[in-house]
C-alpha cells in the first residue's frame, strides 16, 4: 500500500488527472462521465502509484468507437516515460505503433 499524506496524495491525483485531460472533472461522479473518460481516470489512478509495469487488458473493448481514440492517445504518453506496458488488445495498428515487441496470439497459442 502506498502511504502519502492527504496534501501529497491530492497533488499527485491532480497531476495525473491533468495528464490524461480529466482535471476539469475532478469532482464528477462516475455516472456523470463517459466510458472513455472513466477509462482515462482509471489510467491516471494506476499511473499515480508509480508502477514499473502496467497491464491493460482490452482497454477499449467496452467503449463506443468514438471514444477509442481518446483512450489510445492517453495510453501513448506513458510509453515515453520508460514505463513498461503489457497490452492485450485487438487494436493491432496501435500495438505496432507503440510497442517494442508484439506477440500475436490465436486460439490460445503464440502465432508469431
Image (cartoon, grey):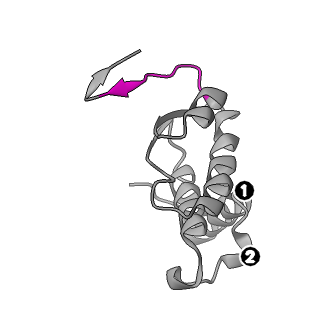
Q: In what quadrant of the picture does the C terminus appear?
A: top left
Viewer-side residue, 66 vs 11: 66
Q: In what quadrant of the picture does the N terminus appear?
A: bottom left
Does 105 appear in magenta?
yes
Q: Which residues are magenta?
A: 99-106
Which dot marks residue 24?
2
Q: Secondary structure at mark 2?
A: helix
Residue bearing the label numbered 1 = 19
Vertical relation: 89 (above or below) 68:
above
Vertical relation: 85 (above or below) 25:
above
Which x, y percent locates residue 57?
41, 46
**Residue 110 appears in which quarter of the rendering?**
top left
Give me the residue at 73% from left, 63% from top.
Answer: 21
Which x, y percent locates residue 52?
51, 35
Does 7 appear in magenta?
no
Q: Secondary structure at mark 1?
A: helix
**Residue 71 appears in which quarter of the rendering?**
bottom right
Vertical relation: 62 (above or below) 26:
above
Viewer-side residue, 13 vs 43: 43
Dot placed on the residue nearer the N-terminal end, 2 or 1: 1
Give me the residue at 56% from left, 50% from top.
Answer: 47
Give me the residue at 70% from left, 43% from top.
Answer: 77
Q: Residue furthest left?
A: 108
Spatial distance from mark 2 to mark 1, Cα to Cα? 11 Å
Q: On the rendered structure, is 14 left or right of 60? A: right
Which x, y percent locates residue 106?
33, 27
Amino acid at each position: 500500500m502506498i502511504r502519502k499524506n492527504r496534501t501529497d496524495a491530492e497533488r499527485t491525483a491532480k497531476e495525473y488527472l491533468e495528464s490524461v485531460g480529466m482535471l476539469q472533472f475532478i469532482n464528477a461522479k462516475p455516472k456523470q462521465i463517459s466510458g472513455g473518460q472513466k477509462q482515462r481516470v482509471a489510467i491516471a489512478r494506476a499511473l499515480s502509484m508509480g508502477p514499473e509495469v502496467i497491464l491493460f487488458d482490452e482497454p477499449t473493448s467496452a467503449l463506443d468507437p468514438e471514444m477509442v481514440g481518446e483512450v489510445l492517445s492517453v495510453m501513448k504518453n506513458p510509453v515515453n516515460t520508460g514505463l513498461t506496458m503489457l497490452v492485450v488488445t485487438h487494436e493491432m495498428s496501435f500495438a505496432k505503433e507503440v510497442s517494442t515487441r508484439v506477440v500475436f496470439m490465436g486460439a490460445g497459442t503464440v502465432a508469431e
